[in-house]
Image (tube, rainbow, N blue to C red):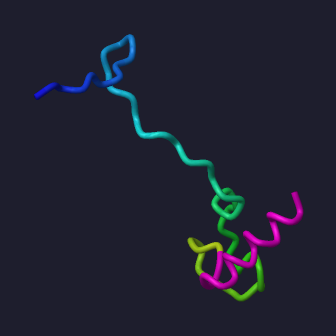
Amino acid sequence: METKPTDVSDDGATPAEPVLPLRARQMLPPKGACWYCEKPLDSVRRFCGKVCADAFDEEAQFCR
């Protein structure tokens, strides 16, 4: 059975997995409120739920 050669960079390390582009919502800093509906949140979260996060992504797509 043949072995497949792996891509190796000049320094001998194997390449890392490809980096996926960040969504617009992932670049937003947490602000203590939902970025879409302004509902109060803790200081870690950006959106109150998936509905607001998806709506923000959809709006950002049309505002490019």
**Nearer to us in this view, 8 or 22:** 8
Rendering quarter of residue 32: bottom right
* Residue 52 picture location, percent across and down: 69, 82
User: Please, is residue 41 above or below residue 16 in the view?
Assistant: below
Query: Which residue shows up at 77% across the image and 84% down it?
Result: 38
Left or right of 28 in this view: 44: left
Q: Is residue 55 magenta?
A: yes
In the picture shown, does residue 34 fall above or below 39?
A: above
- Residue found at the far left of this picture: 1
Measuring from the top left, give residue 53's x and y in whole percent: 67, 76
**Residue 4 place in picture, x, y as percent:** 24, 26
* Residue at position x 65%, y 68% in the image: 30
In the rendered image, the vertical position of residue 35 relative to residue 5, given as above or below: below
The extreme top residue here reads 10
Q: Main secondary structure of the magenta part?
A: helix
The answer to if 51 sits in the magenta stretch is: yes
Question: Which residue occupies 63% across, 60% down?
Answer: 26
**With 18 as the anchor, is 14 left or right in this view?**
left
Indicate the position of residue 22 as horizontal and vertical percent values: 63, 53
Quadrant (top left/top right/bottom left/bottom right) for the N terminus: top left
Q: Which residues are magenta?
A: 47-64
